[in-house]
Image (tube, rainbow, N blue to C red):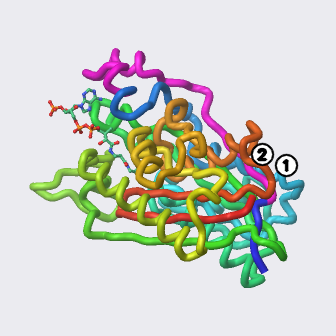
């Protein structure tokens, strides 16, 4: 038994913030942002939109694409690091909004790898027969934990959501999933305070994202390369067999370096960072949905999804779409 993606969906909030807009608020330039990140614009949630609102939009589209109804869904897993509330979790909020009753619903917090962790978890439920129709979402409003006066982070992040429905299949489907983490890097990309961590004299309360960008960059490139190589090796595959590489969209330079190191032509890589910025756990399902809807991702294609994020966390999913 395998699980297989039967529908995808995604959503970007209406409000667009361009690099030119940011030039007016922080000491930056469109040229710097484009050269260092590849980002030209990002979408930002409206004041009255929370992560669950974005998630619901993507979920509805994925369910329509899969041809399933709320009563069919028997598992909801959401990857997010910017939940509406400490609790109830975003899965429960989505469940209520979609009129789904009784099934397990939970969130997984693994920063930018959140969707890969969520998909891996949901795959296990389907493969072991514990779920027959799982809704898997990556959704974020990281704009709420960005310090809009910090030019080193505010130019990078955006809001959005992506979702898939997975169902049992005799043919793969999801072929293999690989997850990893290394907490020794916890301080390189984090929010220094949170609901439980009290401020101290040397660490006042700071709920905003802080990042040692350059150090994160180097580990991100190496780790993404190694997770892709590991995934290919464990499946006795060569990079040339992959139809589409769908990496986490953190920085165009990271993706270009990855494509070069893996000798995978950039034409075989889905790139959305220019239009969306880094949407954390939403970035991989957003890019997947873009590829499916613009016709690049065809049924039967071999897709390799990969992500890397704060924690550090990382993961990959190899699947036949
Ligand atoms: O999603 C999870 C994983 N996240 C990532 O993978 C992100 C990884 N990191 C990155 O994408 C890049 O490191 C950044 C885009 C964050 C930064 O690019 P960089 O080439 O590593 O720049 P840097 O941090 O080394 O900074 C270079 C210079 C500095 O000035 P000095 O010290 O050389 O005078 C910064 O102060 O650029 C300056 N700078 C800026 N200048 C204009 C930093 N941010 C900005 C800005 N506009 N927005």
Depth check, front residue: 308 or 121:
308
The structure residue drawn at horizontal position 50% and vertical position 37%, both measured from the top left corner, is 273
Instruction: In the rendered view, tell whether residue 289 sits above or below residue 307.
Output: above
Residue 224: name its quadrant: bottom left
Q: Does the numbered disc 1 mark a residue whose Cβ is under 8 Å from ligand 1?
A: no
User: Taking 307 as reference, is 268 above or below it?
Assistant: above
Q: Residue furthest left?
A: 201
Q: Which residue is mark 2?
A: 61
**Residue 90 visible in the displayed image:** no
Q: Quadrant of residue 242?
A: bottom right
Q: Contact, CB < 8 Å: mark 2 with mark 1?
A: yes
Q: Is label 2 within 8 A of ligand 1 (CB to nearest ligand atom)?
A: no
Label 2: state its secondary structure: helix
Percent x, y of residue 237: 60, 68
Q: Which mark is residue 49?
A: none
Q: Residue at x 47, y 48 (%)?
A: 259
Residue 255 colored in magenta in the image:
no
Residue shown at 49% from the left, 63% from the top:
228
Q: Quadrant of residue 272?
A: top right
User: Which quadrant of the rendered structure holds the C terminus?
Assistant: bottom right
Residue 119 seen in render: yes
User: Which region is colored magenta?
Assistant: 6-33
Numbered disc 1: secondary structure: helix
- Residue 196 in percent (x, y) is at 33, 64
On the image, numbered disc 1 is attached to which residue? 64
Q: Residues within 10 Å of mark 2 (few under 14, many from 20)?
A: many
Which residue is pictured at 80% across the width and 65% down the height?
73
Q: Residues within 10 Å of mark 1 (few under 14, many from 20)?
A: some
Report the Cα–Cα distance between label 2 and label 1: 5 Å
Q: Quadrant of ligand 1?
A: top left
Q: Is residue 88 left or right of residue 198?
A: right
Is 94 positioned to the left or the right of 203 in the image? Answer: right
């Amino acid at each position: 038994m395998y699980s297989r993606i039967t529908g995808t969906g995604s959503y970007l909030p209406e409000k667009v913030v361009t690099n030119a807009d940011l030039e007016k608020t922080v000491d930056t330039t469109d040229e710097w942002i484009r050269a260092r990140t590849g980002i030209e614009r990002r979408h930002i949630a409206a004041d009255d939109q929370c992560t669950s609102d974005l998630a619901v939009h993507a979920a509805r589209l994925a369910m329509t694409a899969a041809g399933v109804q709320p009563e069919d869904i028997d598992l909801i897993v959401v990857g997010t690091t910017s939940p509406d509330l400490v609790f109830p979790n975003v899965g429960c909020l989505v469940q209520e909004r979609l009129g789904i009753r009784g099934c397990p619903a939970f969130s997984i917090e693994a920063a930018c790898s959140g969707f890969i962790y969520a998909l891996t978890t949901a795959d296990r439920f389907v493969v072991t027969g514990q779920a027959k129709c799982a809704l898997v979402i990556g959704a974020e409003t990281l704009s709420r934990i960005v310090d809009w006066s910090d030019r080193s982070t505010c130019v990078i992040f955006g809001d959005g959501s992506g979702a898939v429905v997975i169902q049992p299949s005799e043919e793969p489907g999801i072929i293999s999933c690989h997850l990893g983490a290394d907490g020794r890097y916890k301080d390189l990309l984090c929010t220094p305070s949170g609901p439980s961590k009290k401020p101290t004299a040397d660490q006042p309360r700071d709920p905003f994202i802080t990042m040692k960008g350059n150090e994160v960059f180097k580990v991100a490139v190496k780790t993404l390369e190694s997770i892709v190589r590991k995934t290919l090796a464990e499946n006795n595959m060569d990079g040339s067999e992959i139809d589409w590489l769908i990496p986490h969209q953190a920085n165009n330079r990271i993706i270009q370096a990855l494509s070069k190191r893996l000798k995978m032509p950039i034409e075989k890589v889905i790139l959305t960072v220019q239009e969306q910025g880094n949407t954390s756990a939403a970035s991989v399902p957003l890019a997947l949905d873009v590829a499916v809807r613009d016709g690049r991702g065809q049924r039967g294609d071999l897709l390799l999804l990969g992500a890397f994020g704060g924690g550090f966390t990382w993961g990959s999913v190899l699947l036949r779409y």
